Amino acid sequence: MSVDDRLRAGFVANAADFIPEGEERLEQVHARLRRRRYLQTAAVVVSAAAAVAIIAALGGQWPSTQRQEPVGRPTSTATAAATGIEEQGIPDSTWTKVATREQAERIGVPEARIDHEFGADGLLPLTFDLTDGYYAVLNTNDDGVVESGDSGTYEYDDRGRLVTTSNVPGCPGCVLTYRWHIDNDRLVLEETQKTEMHHMERVVMLGTWARDDS
């Protein structure tokens, strides 16, 4: 089965077809997002309590403040390399994007495949999760159900490129290599000459992903 069948197998397979590990990775993603929301809520409560205590200590007056320049994430590959992020790899994180029917048509995905994957609205919401050396690619269908499209392990080669190895039944052991960089809250994946990608893989994986901090 071709490398392209990996995503097809994942997006059309039902829960009985997909390997348990894929479902387990999906649950891990959801659990991590729930923990993140809990910690954010707790941080807001603690900050509010601290503010009240400061106001009380100052007799009900807000302390004076001075404007400070925000400290942001690296904004380019060069900056990221200077701070060591490129050497360390992509931090554990979740990224999202929405692929469109128009993008698929420009790349040359067959019409029947486009109709199946993108549905009536012509949109394919995608999630890309990287955690502890494991990755998962998820899509949301027209009914709002999250489905597993691909999953496996990842590492970095001697040039710092992202290398993914799939473990889905459609293409176990299939390897894809990407150039990447983080620009603020954007992860950009680019194809390399080392790997031949099929049309649907390009639509799903390449391009700009937004960090999901929810």
Image (cartoon, rainbow, N blue to C red):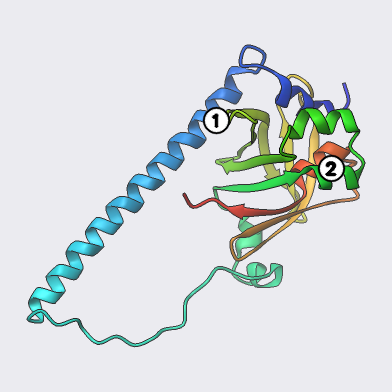
Residue at left offset 55%, top offset 41%: 132
Q: In terms of depth relative to the viewer, which is nearer, 81 or 108?
A: 108
Residue 1 in the image: x percent, y percent? 87, 21
> Tag 1's secondary structure?
helix
Q: Which residue is mark 1?
A: 26
User: Within 10 angstroms of label 2, few (less than 14), some, or many (20 or more) residues?
Assistant: many
Instruction: Using the image, tell me which numbered label, if any, was put on residue 104.
Output: 2
Query: Quick check: marks 1 and 2 in contact, CB under 8 Å?
Result: no
Q: Can you tell which quarter of the image residue 175 is in? A: top right
Q: In terms of depth relative to the viewer, which is nearer, 182 or 156?
A: 182
How many numbered marks, from 0 up?
Answer: 2
Instruction: Using the image, tell me which numbered label, if any, was put on residue 71.
Output: none
Residue at left offset 62%, top offset 47%: 96
**In the rendered image, is residue 3 in sight?**
no
Residue at left offset 65%, top offset 59%: 87
**In the rendered image, is residue 25 in sight?**
yes
Q: In terms of depth relative to the viewer, which is nearer, 153 or 150?
A: 150
Q: Can you tell which quarter of the image residue 101 is in? A: top right
Is residue 185 found left or right of 172 in the rendered image?
Answer: left
* Three-letter code for the amino acid on which mark 2 is drawn: Ala
User: Within 10 angstroms of label 1, few (less than 14), some, or many (20 or more) residues?
Assistant: many
Residue 158 drawn above or below residue 4: below
First in sequence, mark 1 or 2: give its number. Answer: 1
Residue at left offset 58%, top offset 18%: 20
* Three-letter code for the amino acid on which mark 1 is drawn: Leu
> Tag 2's secondary structure?
helix
Residue 138 in the image: x percent, y percent? 63, 34
Is residue 122 found left or right of 58 in the rendered image?
Answer: right
Residue 105 in the image: x percent, y percent? 88, 43
Residue 54 drawn above or below residue 110: below
